[in-house]
Amino acid sequence: MPVTTDPTHLTGLMTTPRPARSAPRPPQEHPMDAHALAEAVFGRRLSAGERAELDRFWRTDWSTHRLSLADAADHSLAATALAFGTPVFHGSGAGYALTFHPDAEVVDAVRRGLGRPASWRPALITTRSRVLDLVDVEALHPSPAEFLAALDERLAHGPVALTVPAAADVPRHLTTRCDGVATIELVVPGAACPSGAFLDAALVRAGVGHLATTRPYATSAGTGARGPVLDRISAIQKEFGRMRPGAVMLAHRSEWRARRRHAPLHEAS
């Protein structure tokens, strides 16, 4: 079976077609619940306090509630959710991305929730300072120093997505074989991207050097055909807001218009 990876981000400007109107999809039920996903990430049972903290995220109705990417407390909360194994839809460049913990159980649960095929692989996202940890530097041409210099030049204009040879310690469920070489699609946010602070906090809180990511797009329940990329938070909420376990919505400031702006996270069941 061929392996497919997502072209998650366009280099530089990230412009996408407007999504066509469609009926909301029913809630997606994962075989693993949110507690089981978190326990898979942590490798142990959750404490009562941790379960209560996690319940704040997945009991929220994310089809109506949004956090703001521009609010430090909100992106800190989303970073905590991600560390628990809860995926986060967040502003990225001019559009949106879905970013999540790279643990194999979480990747598989997200794949099923999005309706992607079994062969699908997410891209990996990290900060500029961590890039070489994911790359087989011996296979880089030009040299690592020249590679980083060229990367910095491009990051000044926006996010960058590259297919690169994977470092030996990148898990197999995140790599694609190309001509016998393990590769990854590597995404690095632009130097001025508003998602930078959230991603850095999520990496630290999760204790990892990279996260998994993809662009959100609708998939036909009947045929599996890919629809347009969803680049507005309202369209993402309509398509995925009732996914279970839930996915946190972290909107661009310009789109942050939560219906219950001051409501507590645990209000919806």
Image (cartoon, rainbow, N blue to C red):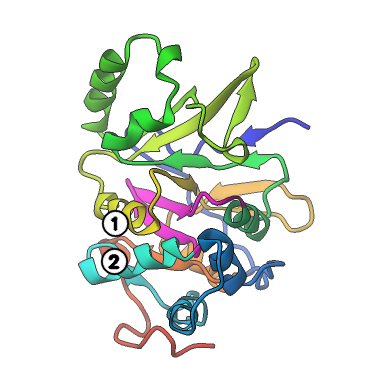
The part of the chain drawn in magenta is: 85-104
- Residue 98 drawn in magenta: yes
Q: Where does label 2 land, which residue?
A: 76
* Residue 159, placed above or below residue 183: below
Classify mark 1: helix, strand or loop.
Answer: helix
Residue drawn at the location 51% of the way across and 35% of the way down:
170
The percent coordinates of residue 138 (x first, y second) are 42, 13
Residue drawn at the location 72% of the way across and 46% of the way down:
117
Residue 266 visible somewhere in the drawing: yes
Q: Where does label 1 land, which residue?
A: 201
The percent coordinates of residue 65 (x first, y second) are 41, 77
The percent coordinates of residue 146 (x first, y second) are 27, 13
- Who comes first in sequence, dot 2 or dot 1? 2
Kind of residue at disc 2: Ser
Q: Say whether marks 2 and 1 touch (CB < 8 Å).
A: yes
* Residue 203, placed above or below residue 81: above
The percent coordinates of residue 114 (x first, y second) are 63, 56
- Residue 28 drawn in magenta: no
Kind of residue at disc 1: Ala
Residue drawn at the location 30% of the way across and 60% of the way down:
252
Mark 1 crowd level (few <14, some 14–19, many ≥20, 10 Å Cα): some
